[in-house]
Amino acid sequence: MNSQMDFSKVCTAFKTRRLYDMSDVLMDQIWLKSQPDRVLYDMYREVHLSGKDLTQMKTHVLRYDITVIPPGMLGPEYIKTAGHYHPPVSHLSCADAPSYPEVYQVIHGTATYLLQKRDLSEFIVIEAKEGDVVLIPPDFGHVTVNTSLEKLTMANWVSDAFESEYEPIREKAGLLYYLTEDGFCKNKNYEQFPEIAVKKPKSYPEFELFSGVDMYGLACDLDKLEFLRHPEKFMDAFRRPFYESAV
């Protein structure tokens, strides 16, 4: 997918996230009160290169999106997405049903992905560059941060069978840690803080996801993305290390 493409012409829905849409998850509320409202980032939903691709996506209940985040600061924090969790898969009624996973790929720029397990036992940081693939496994909330001086463009494949859950992160005013110019800062609204685990992206051959290979190409064979709709069938794969140590 070309980062210079006019995504507004190949999507079915366009949304912007504004500063005051993010007021509940910002570290510095005093700074926020002094700021005019502004657009922070753009989201293009159901991006498709042909009508046939869109039909197949809808048939498979999958969605390919593009998010564009310019460089900037939110007070002491680097610009970021609002952050959310995914609900348990809707076709399972068991109490331990996994939540829907998601997969991202950086098209242009550099992304820092912050992953927080729902039970707060893990907090993972992954820096990804152009072409890198980052898997969000079941039961992890996530935020994307742009710490660079250039625009970040990233894509994601995700099931279209659910609505993201923003409230758990809003209730705590963000994730466990804020990423600031001075490094990570603890969010005082939490009581327990796991050690920050810094990891590197990797390829996922079991899911046909490879660093440097445009994952939009899977639009021609969406059965390979079944793990996004039915993660319960792939839990053995999700239990394996899904990132590499950065050390």
Image (tube, rainbow, N blue to C red):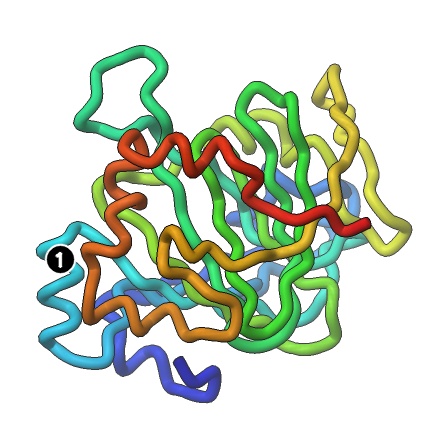
Q: Residue at x 36, y 26 (%)?
A: 98
Observer-nearest of 224 and 107: 224
Please tell me whether mark 1 sits on a helix, a strand or a loop: helix
- Toward the top, the furthest residue is 95
Q: Quadrant of residue 189?
A: top right
User: Which residue reaches farthest bottom?
Assistant: 4
What x and y, as percent, mark residue 199?
Answer: 70, 48
State which quarter of the image contains the N terminus: bottom left
Q: Position of residue 16 (x, y in %)?
A: 44, 62
Image-based side of 184 in relation to 216, left or right: right
Residue drawn 57% across the image and 29% down it: 117
Q: Residue at x 35, y 30 (%)?
A: 87
Q: Residues within 10 Å of mark 1 (few under 14, many from 20)?
A: few
- Foreground of the two, 111 or 220: 220
Looking at the rendering, which quadrant does residue 222 occupy?
bottom left
Q: Is residue 194 above or below residue 229?
A: above
| Residue matched to label 1 | 58
Where is residue 24? Give x, y as percent: 59, 37
Give 62 or 208, whichever is nearer the viewer: 208
Q: Is residue 16 left or right of residue 116?
A: left
Q: How many marks?
A: 1
Residue 62 image offset from top left, x and y in percent: 23, 54
Q: Residue at x 12, y 64 (%)?
A: 56
Answer above or below: position of 235 versus 25: above
Amino acid under disc 1: Lys
Say if 184 sits above or below 6 in the image. above
Q: Is residue 66 left or right of residue 134?
A: left
